[in-house]
Image: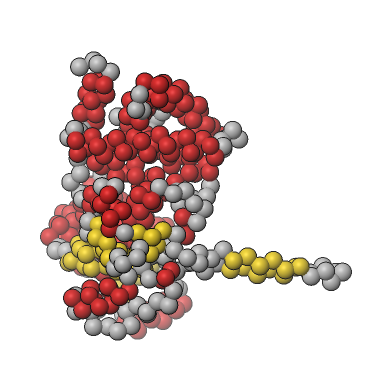
Amino acid sequence: MSNTNIEENLKQVINHFKELSEDEYLSNYLKYPHYMYITNKEKCLYIDDFDMIEKYNRLVQDCWQNLSNKIIDKIYYGIYLSKFNDLILDSYNSKNIKINDIQNIEKYFEKLSLENFTMITKLYGLCLKSNNIKIELGDYIICDYAYFQNNYRHFHNMITNDFFEKPNIMLQNCYLIHKNINAINHQKAEFIFYNKIEKFINLILYCCHNISDENNKISYKDNNINISYIISNNKKNDIKTNFKNDSILNPLYELSQSFFEKKNYERLFKYIDNENLNEIEHKLSIAIDWIGQSMRTNNLQQRFTFLNIALETLLSNKVSGIMDYSVTYRLREYSAFLAADNPEQRSQIFDKLPKLYNKRSQISHQGQSHQLKLKDYYDLIDIVYKVTDRYMKLVTDEEIKTIKDLDNYIKSLKGLI
């Protein structure tokens, strides 16, 4: 919607607001809770026309979507709506609102400074190996209760004694700390942290490289207990019971600092928080996230689809998502050159990928593939891992930074340059 239309529609909506006193507001809200109310310490306005309420909500959404990505990443919709409502309250008496007034809201948030937050949560399904009390990975620390309680909590002057209860089993003895999240307030910091935890878990699974039906239980949420007890009885009084304990009883993975150092995985965790990745690093980060997601679902079609997306992210030079012949041929060719160690392997990969992508197309266009087998997933994940390993070496050893650099590298392997 254009600025002129937004301005005209806002003026129309403002004319439908009505004012209430504080006492009137309380009684009115109890009678008509579905009306829209906006209030501050001095004023209360409401709209009882549901078409106007819908129109107002659409207008706020339009203004929100017109914000720059930088501002949207900085704040969240609720805090923007509150500021927008303040503008309506201020403009009510004059019934005059300009597009500049709305643009001033964006300028207000541009100038708003961020705070630094340290975020801490439990991680279920992981533990630290032997005498490892902490592992540092980029801006993250994985630690046990003793390290948090005796070192980190005192160092950061956390005075609360009941922040986390002392765990009585190993499963509850893994903590994830993010040392520095910049956010507008606690609520936004939590939202950012939750998103980063998901990426962190996906990256951990990528590093562990183990496909398990229990991977989906690794979480920062206390959902490790999942017990069902079902009793069925019929008219003949034949009682049957079914007890199912789907709990995760022990940590799935033991982690150590040396594991991440040996595999040179430490730098991948820095990608999660780095906003200045080059094109190849950015693709690598997104692809690894998809690989991790493929290991956290037990649905074979989802696993397979997520892996295909990871490979496309790494090797495609298009952003439209349309998988035409030129794109699929590029994926075959680039995968063959990056994942193979010799011409024979190169030929095998080149011939194998069309069969795998045919099943991917069936899932995309028909909703499922009856031909998809678990072996297809293992074949594809083997190729994808080899491509990502090669990608990491290209970033460090060959200083490949862009898709154009990658294209030239493949050409050099083919002897074209």
Residue sticking out furthest to the front: 130
Judged left or right of residue 62, residue 214 is right
The answer to which of 392 and 188 lies nearer the viewer is 392
Judged left or right of residue 169, residue 266 is left
Is residue 57 something one can see in this rendering?
A: no
Judged left or right of residue 128, residue 116 is left
The answer to which of 198 and 413 lies nearer the viewer is 413
Who's the residue at 38% across and 45% down the image? 290
The answer to which of 34 and 210 lies nearer the viewer is 210
Q: Where the N terminus falls, by quadrant?
A: top left
The answer to which of 222 and 365 lies nearer the viewer is 222
Q: Where the C terminus falls, by quadrant?
A: top left
- Residue 216's x, y, as percent? 47, 56
Residue sticking out furthest to the left: 111
Above or below, comparing residue 264 to residue 77 in the picture: above
Above or below, comparing residue 206 to residue 405 in the picture: below
Residue sticking out furthest to the right: 236
